[in-house]
Image (cartoon, coloured by chain):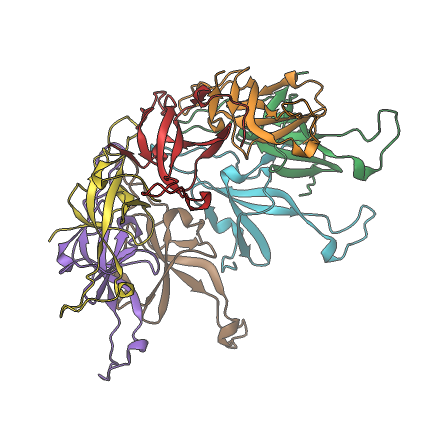
Chain colours: A orange, B red, C yellow, D purple, E brown, F cyan, G green
Amino acid sequence: MATTVRSIKSLVPLLDRVLVQRVKAEAKTASGIFLPESSVKELNEAKVLAVGPGAMSKDGQRVPMSVTSGDRVLVPQFGGSPVKVGEEEYQLFRDSDILAKINE
Amino acid sequence: MATTVRSIKSLVPLLDRVLVQRVKAEAKTASGIFLPESSVKELNEAKVLAVGPGAMSKDGQRVPMSVTSGDRVLVPQFGGSPVKVGEEEYQLFRDSDILAKINE
Amino acid sequence: MATTVRSIKSLVPLLDRVLVQRVKAEAKTASGIFLPESSVKELNEAKVLAVGPGAMSKDGQRVPMSVTSGDRVLVPQFGGSPVKVGEEEYQLFRDSDILAKINE
Amino acid sequence: MATTVRSIKSLVPLLDRVLVQRVKAEAKTASGIFLPESSVKELNEAKVLAVGPGAMSKDGQRVPMSVTSGDRVLVPQFGGSPVKVGEEEYQLFRDSDILAKINE
Amino acid sequence: MATTVRSIKSLVPLLDRVLVQRVKAEAKTASGIFLPESSVKELNEAKVLAVGPGAMSKDGQRVPMSVTSGDRVLVPQFGGSPVKVGEEEYQLFRDSDILAKINE
Amino acid sequence: MATTVRSIKSLVPLLDRVLVQRVKAEAKTASGIFLPESSVKELNEAKVLAVGPGAMSKDGQRVPMSVTSGDRVLVPQFGGSPVKVGEEEYQLFRDSDILAKINE
Amino acid sequence: MATTVRSIKSLVPLLDRVLVQRVKAEAKTASGIFLPESSVKELNEAKVLAVGPGAMSKDGQRVPMSVTSGDRVLVPQFGGSPVKVGEEEYQLFRDSDILAKINE
């Protein structure tokens, strides 16, 4: 799943796909002590980096997307297509797989 | 399935999703004695905390939702996407998965 | 599948769901002798207690229901969502899963 | 699959369902000797006892049924919902599962 | 899969079903020697004996059939519903399962 | 999958089916030495021998075919219905299963 | 999956298919040392070599393609139909399987 892509900003999702990066849990405790990597769990919270133009409906119209670039969202625990750019991991989901927006 | 969300009120379900919290069975007996946690069973009854705007129909209309925020509902025993905010567990269901409203 | 619902009458099925209670086989023989519980078999006959307003068709119309509250019906042997209110067991089926009405 | 139904005539199939009873093979040989029950095989031939009003098409019309009460038909070897009334076994099929009519 | 049908001509396929009989491979060699039954392999070639009126399209029209009674056709190796009339084996396929006509 | 068909030219594919014959890899090396049969691998390249009239769309129109008789095409590695005429093997694919045309 | 095709340019994808070649990871390190072949991993990045005319929609219109010849794209890790021309490996995907364009 590696790529030769230099910047994640070069990725343009197609149709109804949404490019996200999962939020990583804090790797240090409240008192500031750094945790060993194995204690850092992955969250099902993500940031939307880019969205496609929307799927084509049967009558040739674009179905509007539910999320937009910059949104904080809840993503399902499984599924999505992994993309690796440099050392960072990203995921592509379909718009209808995104569970909720986080407004805070 | 953990998140960094501070308040469950920040979650805005997308499309036809319904955010619920299952009702916990009473952790004490009728005579007021507290039961150990393992005897507290989860019920398939839940409270609706937030609902999405509805799925998009094929002709670009929103399909109206069957439940609304504040409703008491029956949810299926399995399925739904788990969400954890702080110590509390929540679930996201699709509107059409909600079995019944409880009017009492 | 337990609930805190006080009365089954509080349950309002959603969309095309049908709330039924299976008929229990007689727990006594023709000559009036009571049978031990293990000999009482469950039947695939049920009484309709409440029905939803009908599923939404693609053009936004409600699909009329085939059964109504009070109907005696045949239900499939498997499937349906179990609901427990107090000591009683009920089931929610979709309207199109109900096999036949019993008119007698 | 047992019922408390007194007469099979009370059963009214819903939607596109067809109530049939499979024809039993003759339990005696051509020369009139009765065969033990285990030699009597079940056939995939059946008599139609009652038919539903037809499924609802997407534009709210009833789809006409292919068979009618009294027809002799071929039914698939597997599938169908079993119904027992008294000592007799019946089956409910969907109209589109019935393979052929027998006109003789 | 046995029936009490006296003549295969009594079978009237429903909807888009096609009644065929597979062609049996010659049970004798070119030089006229009869082969033992186990060497006679079944072919995926068949003769159409009867066809249904066609499936119903969504707008209530009959979809025309691709084959007609008397056609020689190629049938898939697996699938189809077996029917036995007397000692003969027949099969019912759906029209869209028939692979090709044989014009010779 | 054998047939009694005398000539492959007698086969007329139905609906959207395409009759092809896979191209066999050369059974000799560039220097002209014949290879033993086990070294001759099957290719996923094929020649179109005949095509059906096209599937029926929902509004009763024929969907045009993508390939025509005489085309060289790429076929999927698996799938398709095998047909044997004499000693030769052929395959029937659906039009939408054909991957690409080869124009050279 | 081998072919006798002489040039990949002869391949004309049908319907909504997209012919791509996966980008190979550099077989040498940054300092110019060549790596043994087993360390060269396949990427899920690909170059589009040719695209089909688009699938047919239900009302007989071509659905426009999302990518065009020359595009750099992200492809799923699994799936796609392999094609071998000479020593080179290519893949055919459906247009809707392509995840994203790479614009750099």
Left/right placement of residue F92 relative to residue C87 reads: right
Q: Quadrant of the N terminus of chain D?
A: bottom left
State which quadrant residue E59 falls in.
top left
- The percent coordinates of residue E77 (x first, y second) are 48, 57
Q: Nearer the viewer, residue D82 or F103?
A: D82
Q: Nearer the viewer, residue B39 or G75?
A: B39
Q: Viewed as shown, does residue F28 lie left or right of G10?
A: right
Image quadrant of residue F55?
top left
Give the side of residue B69 with respect to residue C73, left or right: right
Image location of residue F3, percent across then percent down: 50, 59
Q: Position of residue D61 (x, y in %)?
A: 21, 35
- For image coordinates 69% across by 37% down, the residue present is G5
The answer to whether E103 is drawn above or below residue B31 in the figure is below
Q: Tell me, yes or no, if residue E6 can be seen here.
A: no
Task: Tell me the quarter of the picture where residue A39 sits.
Answer: top right
Residue at the outermost left position: C104
Identify which residue is drawn at 63% across, 43% down: F44
F42 in relation to E27, above or below: above
Is any atom of residue D83 visible in this view?
A: yes
Q: How many marks?
A: 0
Measured as percent of width and height from the top left, residue D18 is found at 23, 52
